Image: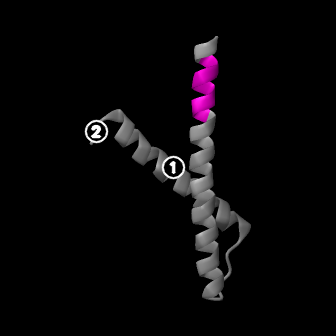
C-alpha cells in the first residue's frame, strides 16, 4: 500500500510541475499576442497549454525511457 501511495505522490508532483510549466508557457504566449495587439482567446490559451504539456511529456518520456 505504501508503494502505491508513493507512486501516486510522484505522479501528482510530476503532473503538477508539467502543468505549471505549460501554464507559464501559455501565459508568456498570451503576453506576446497582447503585446502585438492580436486577439488570444481562452480556447487558444488552453490549446497552447495542452500542446506544451504533450511536448514536455514526450521529452520526459524520451529521457526517462533511455532513448538518449
Q: Which structural element holds mark 1?
A: helix
Q: Is 48 on the left-hand or right-hand side of 57?
A: right
Q: Residue at x 57, y 56 (%)?
A: 21
Q: Quadrant of residue 63?
A: top left
Q: Residue at x 61, y 65 (%)?
A: 26
Q: Is 10 in the magenta? A: yes
Front residue (pair 43, 10): 10
Q: Is residue 36 above or below residue 48?
A: below
Q: Bounds of the magenta span?
A: 4-11
Q: Which residue is mark 2?
A: 67
Task: Examine the residues drawn in magenta and state their main secondary structure.
Answer: helix
Front residue (pair 31, 10): 10
Q: Is 41 in the magenta? A: no
Q: Is 62 on the left-hand or right-hand side of 57?
A: left
Q: Which residue is mark 1?
A: 54
Assess disc 1: are there few (<14), some (14-19) or many (≥20) residues with their C-alpha within 10 Å of its C-alpha.
some
Q: Which structural element holds mark 2?
A: loop
Label 1 to label 2: alpha-carbon separation: 17 Å
Q: Residue at x 51, y 49 (%)?
A: 54
Residue 36: percent from the left, percent from the top? 60, 88
Q: Quadrant of residue 61?
A: top left
Q: Quadrant of the C terminus?
A: top left
Residue 65: percent from the left, percent from the top? 35, 34
Residue 15: percent from the left, percent from the top? 60, 41
Assess disc 2: are there few (<14), some (14-19) or many (≥20) residues with their C-alpha within 10 Å of its C-alpha.
few
Precedes in sequence: disc 1 or disc 2: 1
Q: Residue furthest top?
A: 1
Amino acid at each position: 500500500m505504501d508503494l502505491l501511495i508513493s507512486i501516486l505522490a510522484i505522479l501528482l508532483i510530476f503532473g503538477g510541475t508539467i502543468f505549471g510549466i505549460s501554464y507559464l508557457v501559455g501565459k508568456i504566449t498570451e503576453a506576446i499576442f497582447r503585446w502585438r495587439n492580436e486577439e488570444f482567446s481562452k480556447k487558444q490559451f488552453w490549446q497552447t497549454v495542452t500542446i506544451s504539456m504533450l511536448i514536455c511529456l514526450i521529452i520526459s518520456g524520451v529521457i526517462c525511457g533511455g532513448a538518449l
